[in-house]
Image (tube, grey):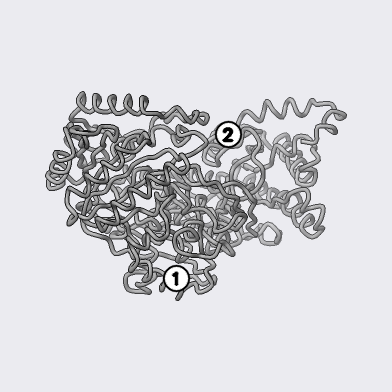
Amino acid sequence: MKVALFGATRGIGRALARELAARGDALCLLGRDEAELMRSCADLSLRGAAAGSFAHCDLLEPLGFEPALARAEEQLGGLDAVIVSAGLFGTQAELERDAGQLERLLDADFVHTIGFCEVARRRLLARGGGTLCVLSSVAGDRARAPVALYGAAKAGLSHYLEGLDHGYRSQGLRTVCVKPGFVRTGMTAGLPEPPFAADPERVARRIVKAIDRGWPVVYVPPIWRAVMALVRRLPRALLRRLRF
Amino acid sequence: MAHGVVSKVAGWGRVPVCDAEEVLDEDLRAAVRGARLTRGLGRSYGDASLPPHPGARVAASRRADRLLAFDASTGVLRAEAGLSLARLSEWLLPRGFAVPVVPGTCYVTLGGMVAADVHGRNHHTAGTIGAYLRSLRLALADGRELEVSAVHEPELFRATQGGMGLTAHILEVELALKRIPSPWIWQETEPLRDLDQLLERLQAASAEWPFTVSVVDALAGGAALGRGVLIKGRWAEPDEAPAQLPRSGFQPRVPFDLPDWALNRSSARLVNALYRARSRLASQAIVAPRAHFQPLDILRDWNRGYGKRGFTQYQAVIPREAGARAVRRLFETLVASAEPPFLCVVKDFGAAGTGLLSFPRPGTTASIDLPLRGERTQALVDALNRCVIDAGGRVYLAKDALTRREHLEAMDGERLRAFDAVRRRYDPERRLSSRLAVRLLGDPA
C-alpha cells in the first residue's frame, strides 16, 4: 500500500506508521519539523517500510496542503491511502483561558483538518478511489463539560467524515473515522488516566485492521463503542450532574 | 510545548515514593528542557530515578523510542535513548543480532542501560555495555547538544557511562551489536553444594561459557552456606536451535500488592526448594533468550510481591584479591540477620569498564533482595557495607537505596571526586540532580 501520513512522528500516528512499515508498505510522512520527520523516516525504513520519504506540511498553513499531497503522491509513485493523525489538544481550562490557543485548536482540528481531507478526497477520487483514515475522538460523540471545546471540534469532524462516507463510498473512497478513547501518548501525558486507557501500539493494530476492511467507524480500544453507546443515551439532566 | 503533571514516582523497589513533575513526550529534546533528570522505565531499585526534591521536573524518555540507523555489515546501531531493550531485542533477533550486554530485566531503556553501565551474565568475557558504546548524543544542563565519544569530549563520555543520569540528558545512543548464530540459548544447570564449590565452579565455568550466573539459597547457613544452582549458557548453534523465533508468550501480572507477610522465611524456603528441584529436572535445554537472561520478567510487576513497604536489592562486589573469605563473611552476615532474603544471585566479574563510576571490577558480586523493614534493614545494609568496605569492594548505585554517604565515600572516594570534577565542569549549577545524588553525593536538596 502507498500511504501518506500526516502527523506520524508522534503518538498514535507513530505507532500506526510502524504497523504499516512492518508489513512493508511505502510511506510518505507529512509534518512540520524536518529533523523529527527525518528521524521517523529512519525508524520506519529500519522497521521495514518499502520506502520512507517526507514532505513539509503544517496544519495551520492550509495553502501547503495541495503541494504536500502532490509531493507525497510523486514520492510514492501513487497513493492508496491518506491517514490524518495530526491535531492539537488543550484542556478545557487552558482553552477557556487562552482565546488564541482556542482559535488555533479549532482551526487545526476542525477547519484545516477538513480542508486537508478535501484535498485528499479530490486526489484519491481522481485516482479512482482509496482510503482516507482520520483520527477523530470519542470526545466528539457526546458533549461533556471537561472536553466541551475539543469535543466540539471532533464532533464536527466526525460529522463531516460520515458525510464523506455517505457521499463517496460508491465512487471508491473509503472513509475510516477513528474514535480513540484515552491513549497513552505525549498528547495525553499529564492528564489523569481514566479506565480503559490503552497504549498506542495496541490501538494502531486495530486501526490498521479497520483500514484494511474499510470500516467507516472504529473505536479504539473497542470497548469504547459500548461505553459511548451508553453515554450517548444518558439523559441530559443526568449528564449535567455527573460532570465527568 | 511539553508540559508535565505532578505525579508519584518510585523506583522498582517501590519505596521511596516522591512527587515529580513528569514530562512525557515523543520528542525527548522538548521533554528534557528544564528537567532536572531524565527517567527511563524506572527499573533502578532505589532513588536514582527520583527528582532531587519533591515536585521537581523529570523528563520521561520512554516514548522517545525510534531506531535511527543500523549498518548490518558492522552491526552498529543508533537509536533514541528511550527505546527499551525488550523492543530492541524483538527487532534484532530475527535479523541475527543481539545487544551484547543485557541486564536481568528487558524493561530498561538504552539510556538507562548507559546511565547504570549495566552488566550481564557475560561480564567475565564481555564487560559492561559501556564497552560497546560508540557515541552518545547528550543534552547538557545549559541546553547545548553535544555528541560525545571516546574521541570527542572523552571525559564526559566516560562519566556518563554509569553516571546515573547526572552528567547530561542522554538523547541518542550508538552501540555495536553482536552477531548471533541463532536467536536461542543453550542452557545448562548444575546444583552447587556450598560456597567453596560455588566459587570454584563459577570460576571454572567462566573459562568455558560466555554466560554464567549462580542462584544461591540465602537461607541456608552452616555447612550448606552458599548452596545453590549454577546456570551456564551460550548462543545456540543453528543446527541445535528450533527453526522458529522465540515468542514472548503470556506474561501474567501481579494484579495487586501482596500483604507484607507474603514473603517470609517459609515461602522463601519453598521457592528455593522448587528452584533447586527444577534445576535438577532440566539440566540441559534450549531456551529463549528472555527465559535465560531475564527469567523474572515472566511475571510482570513482580515487585508488588513485596507489598506496600517495598524492598531493596543489595548488590556489591568483593574484589578477587580479598579472597573467598571476604565473600564468606558477607554471606554469614546475611544469613545471621533476621531478614528473610529471597533468592540471591552470585556472579564473577571480569575486568572493570571505562565508565568513571562503573560498578563492576574483577571479583565476586552478590545481589540480594531485601524487604524494607525500617531500621532493621538499614542495620543489615550497614553491616553488609562494612564487609564490603573491609574487602575493598563497592556497591551498585542502580540498586542502592540505603547506603550511607560516608560508606560510599569509604568505598569509592577517589572515583567520586573525579566524577564530581566532571559534573562541575559541565553543570556547575547542579541543574542535573537526583534524590540519589542528594543522599550520596552531597547535592543540595
Subunit of label 1: B
Give the structural element (helix, strand or loop) at label 2: helix
Front residue of B111/B21: it is B21
How busy is the neighbourhood of tag 2: few (under 14 within 10 Å), some, or many (20 plus)? Answer: some
The residue located at (63%, 57%) in the rendering is B2
Q: Say above or below: B270 vs B32.
A: above
Task: From the top left corner, tell me how far across and down residue B372 is, in percent.
Answer: 45, 40
Up/down of B307 relative to A46, above or below: above
Few, some or many residues within 10 Å of mark 1 (<14, 14–19, 20+): many
Label 2 marks a residue whose chain is A
Q: Position of residue B312 (x, y in %)?
A: 42, 43
The residue labelled by disc 1 is B423
Image spot of residue B113 (x, y percent): 38, 53
Residue depicted at 74% across the width and 25% down the height: A230
* Residue B10 drawn at (x, y percent): 52, 46
Q: Which mark is residue A210?
A: 2
Label 1 – label 2 distance at C-alpha: 52 Å
Looking at this view, is B378 or B76 the one in front? B378
Quarter of the image with the N terminus of chain B is bottom right
1 or 2: mark nearer the eye: 1
Q: Amino acid at mark 1?
A: Arg
